[in-house]
Image (cartoon, rainbow, N blue to C red):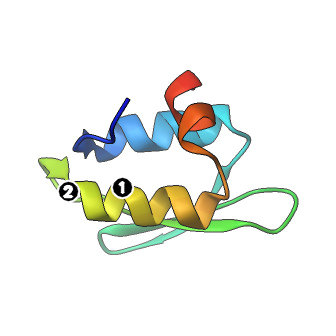
């Protein structure tokens, strides 16, 4: 399934299911980290997060598209 724009809340939910936890939030950007050292920055803006940003979050998380869809 191709990536689609998502709400920040949906992205956070998927990251938390994958084992990421909130480390800090400064302004409208939240930083999530995994126990193995991977880190992801999520923009907590209202509205949808555009596909290129979702793709960057996916790349930062180290998850495959199939893993992402399964979450």
Q: Name the residue beneath numbered marker 2.
A: 50
Q: Nearer the viewer, residue 45 or 53?
A: 53
Decide if residue 23 is in sight here. no
Q: Are marks 2 and 1 in contact (CB under 8 Å)?
A: yes
Q: How far apart are the alpha carbons under marks 2 and 1?
A: 6 Å
Q: Secondary structure at mark 1?
A: helix
Drawn side of residue 19 relative to residue 56, left or right = right
Looking at the rendered image, the quarter that the N terminus falls into is top left
Q: Residue at the far left: name it.
A: 47
Looking at the image, the residue that sits furthest to the right is 36
Q: Secondary structure at mark 2?
A: loop
Classify 39 as above or below 22: below
Viewer-side residue, 50 vs 8: 50
Residue 2 lies, with reference to residue 51, above or below; the image says above
Which residue, given by chain and number where applicable, does mark 1 sit on? Answer: 54
Q: Where residue 59 sits in the image (x, y, percent)? A: 55, 63
Horizontal and vertical percent position of residue 60: 58, 67
Residue at x 32%, y 75% (from the top left corner)? 27
- For the point 28% across and 63% down, the residue is 52
Picture layout, residue 33 above or below residue 71: below
Question: Residue 48's x, y, as percent?
Answer: 16, 47
Determine if residue 43 is in view: yes
Residue 37, image x and y in percent?
82, 68
User: In the figure, 21 relative to 16: above or below?
Assistant: below
Image quarter hosting the C terminus:
top right
Mark linked to residue 64: none
């Amino acid at each position: 399934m191709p990536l689609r724009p998502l709400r920040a809340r949906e992205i956070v939910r998927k990251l938390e299911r994958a084992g990421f936890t909130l480390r800090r939030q400064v302004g409208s950007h939240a930083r999530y980290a995994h126990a193995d050292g991977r880190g992801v920055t999520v923009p907590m803006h209202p509205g949808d997060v555009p596909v290129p940003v979702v793709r960057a979050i996916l790349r930062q998380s180290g998850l495959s598209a199939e893993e992402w869809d399964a979450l």
